[in-house]
């Protein structure tokens, strides 16, 4: 949702709340004409809200909003089921998350975290610690979003860690070989070859 869409949505919600409050307020002493107008506005509340929004647009209240005319941030990225959590953290600058959200964030970054570990034992201990915290969060009834983070299988994660590590090593070796080959192709010939060439040129 862009900044303009969000602002219009908030404006609509505020108008609907005001209209609902006005239509439900007690009016025992109000004139019959006022009561009829209030009933008519409640009956056509949606049209009234749309009209107010159109008038606000005509007044320019939604002009020059931040991000106007720019593409929606991240629209061309692959779908991420946790996009709203990450945007919430970034937008609100949240440093202390609810356990359910913190675990979802940690789960999304777990492979990167495991790849910093240098031994299979360390990977297994990290997975056991992660699973223990997921189980504990499920037991705690703290309110807020539910804990839907799945447990990780330690054997599978260790095997996946091995595969990623092997692939990284192979990629690094291939890249090093390419660099050495390029350096060898651009390196000057040995001194004895240069001496031979200079003698032949005489």
Image (cartoon, helix red, strand yellow):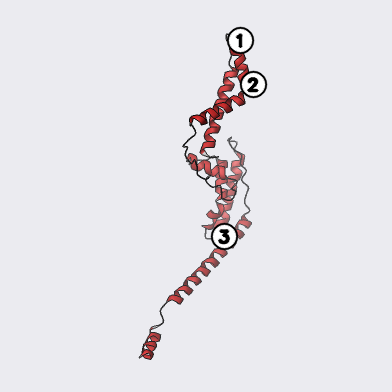
Seen from the viewer's position, the closer of residues 24 and 105 is: 24
In the displayed orientation, state which residue is furthest to the left: 202
Instruction: Place residue 82 in its image quadrant.
Output: top right
Quadrant in which the C terminus appears: bottom left
Seen from the viewer's position, the closer of residues 112 and 55 is: 55
- Helix, strand or loop status at disc 2: helix
What count of labels does the image hold?
A: 3
- Residue 5 image point, x, y percent: 54, 36
Label located before the other in sequence (1 or 2): 1
Which residue, given by chain and number where applicable, does mark 2 sit on?
43
- Foreground tag (3 vs 1): 1
Q: Is residue 91 above or below residue 15?
A: below
Question: Which numbered dot is residue 120?
Answer: 3
Real-space CA distance between mark 1 and mark 2, rounded to the nearest whole angstrom = 16 Å
How crowded pointer 1 is (Cα within 10 Å; few <14, some 14-19, many 20+) is rated as few
Which residue, given by chain and number where applicable, does mark 1 sit on?
32
Instruction: Place residue 111 in its image quadrant.
Output: bottom right
Disc 1 to disc 2: CB gap under 8 Å? no
- Helix, strand or loop status at disc 1: helix
Q: Residue at x 40, y 79 (%)?
A: 188
Label located before the other in sequence (2 or 3): 2
Q: Is residue 25 above or below residue 170?
A: above
Quadrant in which the N terminus appears: top right
């Amino acid at each position: 949702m862009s900044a303009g869409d969000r602002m219009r949505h908030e404006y609509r919600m505020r108008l609907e709340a005001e209209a609902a409050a006005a239509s439900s307020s007690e009016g025992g002493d109000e004139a019959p004409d006022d009561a009829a107008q209030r009933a008519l506005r409640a009956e056509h509340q949606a049209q009234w809200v749309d009209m107010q929004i159109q008038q606000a647009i005509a007044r320019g209240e939604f002009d020059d909003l931040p991000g106007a005319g720019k593409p929606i941030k991240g629209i061309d990225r692959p779908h991420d089921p946790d996009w709203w959590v990450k945007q919430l953290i970034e937008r609100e600058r949240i440093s202390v998350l609810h356990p359910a959200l913190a675990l979802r964030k940690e789960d999304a970054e777990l492979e990167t975290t495991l790849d910093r570990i240098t031994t299979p034992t360390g990977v297994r201990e990290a997975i056991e610690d992660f699973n223990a915290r997921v189980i504990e969060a499920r037991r705690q009834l703290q309110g807020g979003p539910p804990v839907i983070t799945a447990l990780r299988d330690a054997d599978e994660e260790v095997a996946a860690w091995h595969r990623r590590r092997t692939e990284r090593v192979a990629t690094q070796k291939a890249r090093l070989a390419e660099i050495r080959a390029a350096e060898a192709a651009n390196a000057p010939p040995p001194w004895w070859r240069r001496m031979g060439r200079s003698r032949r040129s005489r």
